[in-house]
Image (tube, coloured by chain):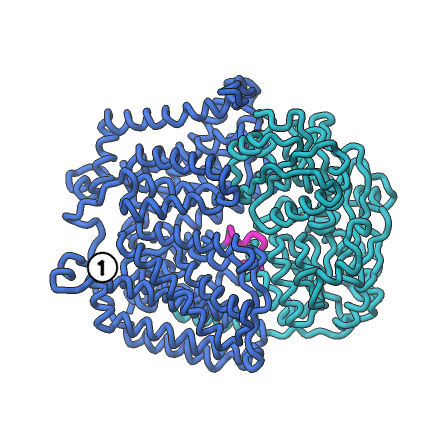
């Protein structure tokens, strides 16, 4: 046992140390870090689409004659593990760039690591504004429409409602807090006479839905802004509908139209909420139809929003690599700036802005409804991300160090 | 119940709860709709969970009752990991929403507020279950035996009661109730993969606040915390994170044995007196020296990533050694040791963020911050004993964690503090590794020296025989307090180094999983050996890192490895080495 252990450590050291011999013209390697074990509902469809996109790129002859390879790592939702993986991917697996991230704090940790080690990091999902603004850096780009952008999309709709008395409910962490802050600020700017009469911040994943619903009802708002998602959302909706919280009240809700969160609700999906999301059944642009058919044919399941995020991330990376003609980090960054690529939504081309490294990827805004026993989005429209960002000089002020 | 009778800290209880919910979902959706389908499905799910509980008890826990206290915790943690991945494989990643209870779908008006019927039903279920249990415990022979075993396990055994049967049946009933609890959530909440960990911490809190082994106490505590939760959020909407732990801390400070708990009969303390610590035997010492030599000589020839892993292992060795110091010689388990690790990291990071301090200053600040917390928290914790003390450390850790999480202006909230990188001279990975190694080895040796110094002997005297130790004039309280602080300082050094090796600091550094990691390392290595934590930290960090990197189902594998280690090395890895030596 003892000898075995010592031997094992030695052997492990040797494995860890083994340099990967790599010719310049070998495959291009992407290191992908995500919280696979802690967020499987979002990330299994994500990884499916990632694999599909990489296979498509390779089947079409790769990028400049080189194949793309991905090395996946699971951070289990812990930023410190993500940083260790990033070190391993760069030093051992010799990846050329990093990608991924679901949780905001994991995204920020990898972004800071990328900045310190001068490597490109293409963040796919983390929503926090800090990733490209307050703590943005030269090496980090983000694909997904940020917290600010999604709030701005909803505020546009919320301002049209007659409601004056608003209540908010959001999970108690950075995403929930900054969503509420932006929503309040932007809505007050659009309609100075609104008041916010109650706010609730249940712990993420542990909402006491009955008490939360009662607390909101007690303030008697005319409309509610909801940021809870996943299990919290389900419990909130169930308690809220039984207790009549949503009767004669409009609800404006972030991300609720995403199939990840709408599907589990089944025929209990709330009706007539104003949401951001992804109406995968009804988007019939050419690009999306092709994407949806390919995904269904391969995985016998419909795509989720995570699938689009992954597919777009790979498309963006492949397009960037064609433009940079090499894997030198500085040249890849040059190529990322102002990069335009087609999204799986099939709408207008998405651009990675030179200004703040944020992509102009958008989201769909619409109302929820129940059709044949499942929640869907109706009356939706595509909100192009570029229309929901602050003016350039404001962004420069928000992004001090980069 | 399980806790009261078997003294097992059963992490898997949350998994039973989750399994109950998942099984109920499957049964209820498969069985025909209607009353029979629904209620039959719920009860069947609870029974199946009971059977699973019995299987785990018979196949796993029964084999390790003789192992040191808390060792079973390690086994149940293995079960948690395995169940998580199995549930993902069987039921898929998507949250599942069960049907509502037939006949109880609607709501009724109570005092002008619409109130769901099903919640009213649940409000009735609680007291009914309590009543049934009370009858069971007070009107049957079996119940009398269980109560007797809760009060004094050895005496019951000495009177010729079949303890095995008693333990198994208690485990069966406890698991059924956990499964029933999960199954009854079906009409209220979605069934998801996070249910197990969400419920387990609060279940422990309720049990401890109520007083171990006291059913009415648990009921009272659940009511108290539930009410505080419902009304607390009206005044402080953000208090949800920490409320239960604040209540627990307050209760334990005022009533050291919970609301309705009684101090354990002190005539004969259940735990056996541990043999005196031996110095590591000769060959073992050589082995450790050889390992150290390897750690010094090999790294220059390794790649950068190996250095990262080696750095992390060195830090974890110190972290585990610091926990072992209070757990082994001090005899006080800590469920919240990550607090001092995290406070060390934050101590360094805050100096960097707010005063732009260089690394050298940050590394001095780290143990200082952790030590300060150790002095304050320790003063409360070392007054208590056993599981109560451990749970109070957990409460303080959670309070510290929520402060880091919610005090956004100071700590950056859950987005953490970035840019905590070493000074220029220590930037190269090799230099930083040697710095870490030097500090960690020095601190670990210092702890070891303390164990064999008069201070350490006094500490162990206080652990094994508090009355005699006091009688010969040792001030048990101050000795334990000093030990607690010393352990906190050592954990703080580890935390500070960890912050600089990762470049950023997050509240996860002092969250429950990190405390559990530390416990696992110490238990895996063996509590009763001096070299245990070192071996445990090496093994755990290395296995964890390898599995996580190479396999998607790493939790399943890690859980299995833990179970195997538990079954074959019930004294811990280093314990085996000593026995053979």
Residue depicted at x 74% and y 49%:
A149
User: Is B551 contained in the magenta span?
Assistant: yes
Q: Is residue A129 left or right of residue B158?
A: right
**Which percent across, then down, holds residue B7?**
30, 45
Query: Which quadrant would residue B335 be assigned to in this image?
Result: bottom left
Q: What are the residue bounds of the magenta stretch?
A: B547-557
Residue lying furthest left: B471
Q: Is residue A55 visible?
A: no
Query: Which quadrant would residue A286 be assigned to in this image?
Result: top right
**Which percent across, then down, holds residue B292?**
41, 77
Q: Is residue B226 left or right of residue B63?
A: right
Query: Which quadrant would residue B52 be assigned to in this image?
Result: top left
Secondary element at tag 1: helix
Q: Quadrant of the C terminus of chain A?
A: bottom right
Give the chain letter for cyan.
A
Q: Is residue B4 left or right of residue A85?
A: left
State the residue position of label 1. Answer: B463
User: Is B141 contained in the magenta span?
Assistant: no
Give the chain letter for blue.
B
Q: Is residue B439 left or right of residue B213?
A: right
Residue depicted at x 61% and y 32%:
A237
Residue depicted at x 48% and y 52%:
B402
In the rendered view, tell whether residue B318 sits above or below residue A164: below
Q: Which of B206/B270 is in front?
A: B206
**Which percent across, then down, holds residue B86?**
53, 44
In the rendered view, tell whether residue B299 sits above or below residue B8: below
Q: How many numbered marks, from 0 up?
A: 1
Q: Is residue B298 visible?
A: yes
**Which percent across, then down, holds residue B557?**
50, 53
């Amino acid at each position: 046992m003892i000898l075995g252990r010592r031997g094992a450590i030695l052997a492990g050291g040797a494995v860890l140390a083994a340099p990967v011999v790599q010719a310049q013209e070998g495959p291009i390697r992407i290191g992908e870090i995500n919280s696979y074990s802690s967020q499987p509902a979002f990330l299994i469809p994500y990884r499916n689409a990632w694999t599909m996109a990489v296979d498509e790129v390779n089947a079409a002859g790769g990028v400049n004659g080189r194949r793309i390879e991905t090395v996946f790592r699971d951070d289990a939702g812990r930023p410190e593990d993500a940083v260790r993986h990033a070190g391993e991917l760069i030093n051992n697996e010799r990846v050329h760039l990093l990608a991924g991230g679901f949780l905001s704090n994991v995204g920020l940790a990898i972004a800071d690591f990328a900045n310190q080690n001068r490597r490109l990091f293409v963040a796919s999902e983390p929503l926090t504004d800090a990733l490209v603004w307050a703590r943005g850096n030269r090496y980090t780009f983000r694909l997904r429409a940020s917290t600010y952008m999604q709030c701005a999309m909803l505020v546009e709709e919320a301002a049209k409602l007659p409601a004056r008395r608003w209540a908010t409910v959001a999970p108690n962490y950075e995403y929930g807090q900054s969503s509420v802050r932006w929503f309040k600020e932007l809505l007050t700017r659009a309609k100075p006479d609104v008041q916010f009469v109650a706010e609730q911040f249940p712990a993420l994943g542990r909402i006491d839905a009955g008490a939360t619903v009662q607390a909101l009802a007690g303030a008697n708002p005319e409309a509610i802004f909801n940021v809870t998602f996943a299990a919290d959302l389900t419990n909130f909706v169930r308690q809220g509908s039984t207790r009549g919280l949503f009767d004669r009240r409009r609800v404006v809700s972030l991300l609720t139209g995403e199939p990840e969160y709408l599907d589990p609700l089944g025929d209990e999906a709330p009706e007539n909420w104003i949401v951001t999301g992804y109406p995968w059944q009804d988007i019939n642009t050419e690009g999306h139809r092709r994407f949806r058919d390919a995904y269904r044919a391969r995985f016998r399941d419909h795509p989720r929003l995570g699938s689009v995020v992954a597919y777009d991330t790979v498309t963006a990376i492949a397009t960037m690599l064609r433009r940079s003609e090499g894997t030198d980090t500085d040249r890849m960054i040059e190529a990322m700036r102002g990069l335009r690529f087609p999204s799986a939504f099939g709408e207008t081309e998405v651009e990675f802005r030179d200004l703040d490294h944020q992509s102009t990827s958008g989201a769909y805004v619409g109302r929820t409804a129940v059709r044949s026993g499942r929640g869907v989005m109706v009356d939706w429209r595509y909100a192009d991300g570029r229309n929901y960002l602050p003016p350039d000089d404001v962004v420069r002020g928000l992004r001090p160090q980069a | 119940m399980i806790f009261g009778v078997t003294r097992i800290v059963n992490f898997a209880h949350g998994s039973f709860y989750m399994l109950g919910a998942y099984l109920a979902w499957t049964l209820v959706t498969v069985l025909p709709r209607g009353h029979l389908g629904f209620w039959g499905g719920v009860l069947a799910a609870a029974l199946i969970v009971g059977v699973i509980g019995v299987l785990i008890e018979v196949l796993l826990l029964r084999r390790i009752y003789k192992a040191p206290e808390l060792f079973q915790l390690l086994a149940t943690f293995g079960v948690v990991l395995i169940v998580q991945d199995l549930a993902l494989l069987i039921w898929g990643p998507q949250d599942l929403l069960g049907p509502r209870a037939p006949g109880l779908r609607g709501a009724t008006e109570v005092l002008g507020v619409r109130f769901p019927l099903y919640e009213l039903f649940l409000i009735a279920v609680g007291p009914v279950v309590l009543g049934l249990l009370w009858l069971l415990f007070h009107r049957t022979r079996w119940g009398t035996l269980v109560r007797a075993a809760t009060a004094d396990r050895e005496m019951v055994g000495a009177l010729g009661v079949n303890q095995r049967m008693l333990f198994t049946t208690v485990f069966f009933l406890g698991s059924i109730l956990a499964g029933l609890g999960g199954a009854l959530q079906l009409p209220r909440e979605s069934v998801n993969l996070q249910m197990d960990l969400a419920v387990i911490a609060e279940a422990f809190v309720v049990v401890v606040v109520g007083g171990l082994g006291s059913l009415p106490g648990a009921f009272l505590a659940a009511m108290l915390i539930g009410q505080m939760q419902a009304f607390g959020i009206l005044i402080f909407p953000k208090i949800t994170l920490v409320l239960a732990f604040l209540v627990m801390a307050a209760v334990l400070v005022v009533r050291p044995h919970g609301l309705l708990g009684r101090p354990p009969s002190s005539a004969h303390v259940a735990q056996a007196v541990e043999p005196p610590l031996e110095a590591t035997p000769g060959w073992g010492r050589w082995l450790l020296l050889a390992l150290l030599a390897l750690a010094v000589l090999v790294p220059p020839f390794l790649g950068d990533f190996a250095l990262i892993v080696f750095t992390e292992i060195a830090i974890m060795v110190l972290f585990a050694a610091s926990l072992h110091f209070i757990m082994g010689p001090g005899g006080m388990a800590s469920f919240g040791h990550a607090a001092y690790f995290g406070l060390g990291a934050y101590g360094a990071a805050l100096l960097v963020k707010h005063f732009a301090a260089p690394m050298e200053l940050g590394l001095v600040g780290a143990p200082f911050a952790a030590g300060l917390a150790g002095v304050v928290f320790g003063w409360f914790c070392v007054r208590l004993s056993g599981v109560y003390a451990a749970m109070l450390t957990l409460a303080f850790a959670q309070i510290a964690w929520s402060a880091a999480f919610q005090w956004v202006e100071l700590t950056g909230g859950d987005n953490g503090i970035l840019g905590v990188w070493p000074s220029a001279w220590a930037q190269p990975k090799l230099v930083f590794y040697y710095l870490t190694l030097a500090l960690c080895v020095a601190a670990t040796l210092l702890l070891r020296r303390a164990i064999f110094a008069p201070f350490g002997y006094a500490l162990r005297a206080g652990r094994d025989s508090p009355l005699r130790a006091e009688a010969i004039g040792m001030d048990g309280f101050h000795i334990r307090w000093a030990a607690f602080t010393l352990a906190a300082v050592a954990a703080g050094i580890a935390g500070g180094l960890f912050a600089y090796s990762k470049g950023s600091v997050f509240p996860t550094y002092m969250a429950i999983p990190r405390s559990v990691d530390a416990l696992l390392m110490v238990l895996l290595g063996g509590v009763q050996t001096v070299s245990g934590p070192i071996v445990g930290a090496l093994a755990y960090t290395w296995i964890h890192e390898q599995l996580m990197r190479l396999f998607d189902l790493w939790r399943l594998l890690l859980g299995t490895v833990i179970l195997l280690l538990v079954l074959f090395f019930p004294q811990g890895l280093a314990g085996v080495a000593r026995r053979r030596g």
